[in-house]
Structure formats: structure tokens, C-alpha cells
Image: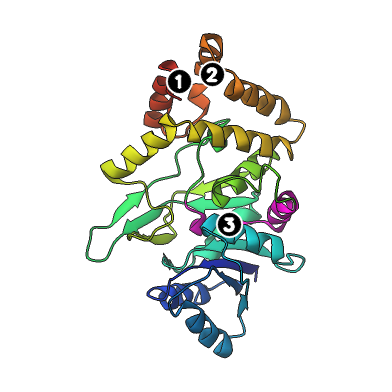
Amino acid sequence: MPRVTVLLATHNGARWIDEQLDTILAQTGVEVRVIALDDASTDTTVALLEARAASDPRLTILTDPTPAGGAAANFYRLLRRVDFTDAGLVAFADQDDVWLPGKLARHAELLAAGADGVSSDVTAFSEGGPRELVRKSYPQREFDYLLESPGPGCTFLMSNRLVTLAQQQLADPESDASRADFHDWLLYVLCRARGWNWVIDDAPSVDYRQHGSNAMGANLGAASAKRRLGLIGNRWHRGEATLLARAGLAVASDSTRPGLERMLDLFERTGPSGRVALLGVAGQLRRRSRDRAIIGTLVALGIW
């Protein structure tokens, strides 16, 4: 069976951690182990992890006395510290979701068919609220990876060589990769920039829990849209895309390098001519047709 190492980042997740671990450790068709790293929890998360680890050798707990300061930073610590030599395939896990049966086995098959990364659609839910499909599996575009992730990181399953590549790029805390704000988006960039395949599965693999403490939710509703427009308006999104283009160039293949160099030049240019040139490739920057229209409009207006 495929071996899968699940990297679990936790912070004050005592309310959900047992259910999440149950659905990870119950995965069939794979040999699974979990490596957890807690980020300065003040509730009983660590005690719950220690109790589980005492009765299940598949769970290993790493410690770090210094607060990471966020989910992405904690995942970066995991990626830097874990020895992936015998780790097999690697997955990310949040502390508060519910993995569907067969998630890892299905995605391992998709990797074996010729990919280095797999993600999927999810079903968002909240306690007592409706369930809603969050689709991420729109057809990939040439440069969509520079402007969006392929789905929540909790759906990711990755090849050993992709995770090792990320570990190498994260070894320098001042590298462009280390300064990326979102670990899931970064891994997608490294994979696609390297010229490797990424599959976005249209079968939801995770029940994606929504609550007030989400580091990054499902991007549903008016409040989420307003937040995203704010990130575009203050140029964070363009700045992050520029940073990730540089991170991608650090690992680019001969086939992807010319396109990445062109995109970096367009992201860094200002003024009307640069805007017109960027507008010409706006159709390759997002997967969903509606999002491509929106980004084209924002570029034309000089907002993005």
C-alpha cells in the first residue's frame, strides 16, 4: 500500500482534533502516519494529542517552544523539520475538518497516474448550517497558479520529490518561498513552475468546517468577497503574485522559465503600456471564467 505522511498543524483545536484524527487514521488503502506540530495552544490540544500518541504509534508529536504565528508558518516549520526520506507521499491536514473515506487512496491513484500534486473540491459546512460545494476544479490555465491556489491545503496529497523541493526552497528563511503567505499556494507554484503535473479532482474529499477561528475559510458570501477586494485594492494580491513568480523562477524548468520571466516582468511593470500587456494574458490567470472576467476588468481599471 502507498505510504502517506500527514503533516498536521494545530492551534487551539481541542474542540475538533479527535474527530479530525479519527477520519485521518481510518483511511483505508494506504499506510498512514501523522506528524503533528502545535503552535502554542492555550487549550487542551496538546494533551489530547499526547493521549492519542500514547495509544497509537502512527501519531508523532513534534514540539517547538517558539510560537509560529500562523498556520502557514507552522506548516513551513513542519516542512523544514521532517525527514522525508522514507515518508512516501505527503499530505497536509488542518485540525478541524472531516476527511471522507477513501480520500488518500483515491488521490494516491491520481498521483500514480502521472502527477506530483493532487487537490480537490470540498464541501463547506458549519454547525447547524447548510452544506455547500466549493468548486476548485475548473480547467487549469497557463498561469492560474500565480494568482490562486488549487484548493484548500487540507485536500493536498503530494509526491515526495515535490515536498523535498519545497523543503530545499524553505531552507533559507529569507528566500522568496519562505516569505509566501500561504503554504498551499506556494506548493502549487513550485509544482507547476517545475513543469510537473497537478490534478484538481472534482470529487470532494473533505468536509471543510467553517467557524470563527478559521485561518482561511471557504471564501463564501459577501463578507469574503469584500475581504478579497480589499486585498486586491491594497496591492497585497499583486505583491504576493510577484513574490510567487520569483519563487517559481527559483525552481523553473527550461519549458516554464520564459513564461514565468515574462509574467514577472508584467507584474513589476507600472503604467498604461504594462497594463495593456498584462490585459493580453489576463485570460490565463484564473481558472473560472467569471474570475477571468473580473481580473481582466480590474487590470483594465488599474486596480490590480
Residue 69, image x, y percentages: 53, 59
**Residue 271 visible in rendering:** yes
Query: Which residue type does callout 3 highlight?
Result: Ala
Tell whether 189 sits left or right of 296. Answer: right
Q: Which residue is mark 1?
A: 299
SS at badge 2: helix
SS at badge 1: helix
Sequence-first disc among 2 and 3: 3
Residue 243, image x, y percentages: 62, 36
Q: Is residue 249 magenta?
A: no
Tell whether 232 sits left or right of 222. Answer: right
Residue 219, image x, y percentages: 36, 46
Query: Which residue type does callout 2 highlight?
Result: Leu
As drawn, the label of residue 73 is: 3
Q: CA distance from mark 2 to mark 3?
A: 31 Å
Q: What colour scheme was applied to this rendering of the protein?
A: rainbow
Please identify the residue farthest to the front as the structure is shown.
66
Mark 3 closeness class: few <14, some 14–19, many ≥20 residues within 10 Å: many
Whether tag 2 and tag 1 are in contact, CB under 8 A, the answer is: yes
Which quadrant of the structure image shows residue 31?
bottom right
Sequence-first disc among 2 and 1: 2
Up-down: is 253 above or below 298? below
Q: CA distance from mark 3 to mark 1?
A: 31 Å
Of 26 and 75, nearer the camera is: 75
Q: Name the chief secondary structure element in magenta.
A: helix
Mark 2 closeness class: few <14, some 14–19, many ≥20 residues within 10 Å: many
Q: CA distance from mark 2 to mark 1?
A: 7 Å
Question: What residue span does the magenta drawing correspond to?
Answer: 152-171
Q: Nearer the observer, disc 2 or disc 3?
A: 3
Residue at the (51%, 45%) spot, across then down: 150
Query: Which residue type does callout 1 highlight?
Result: Val
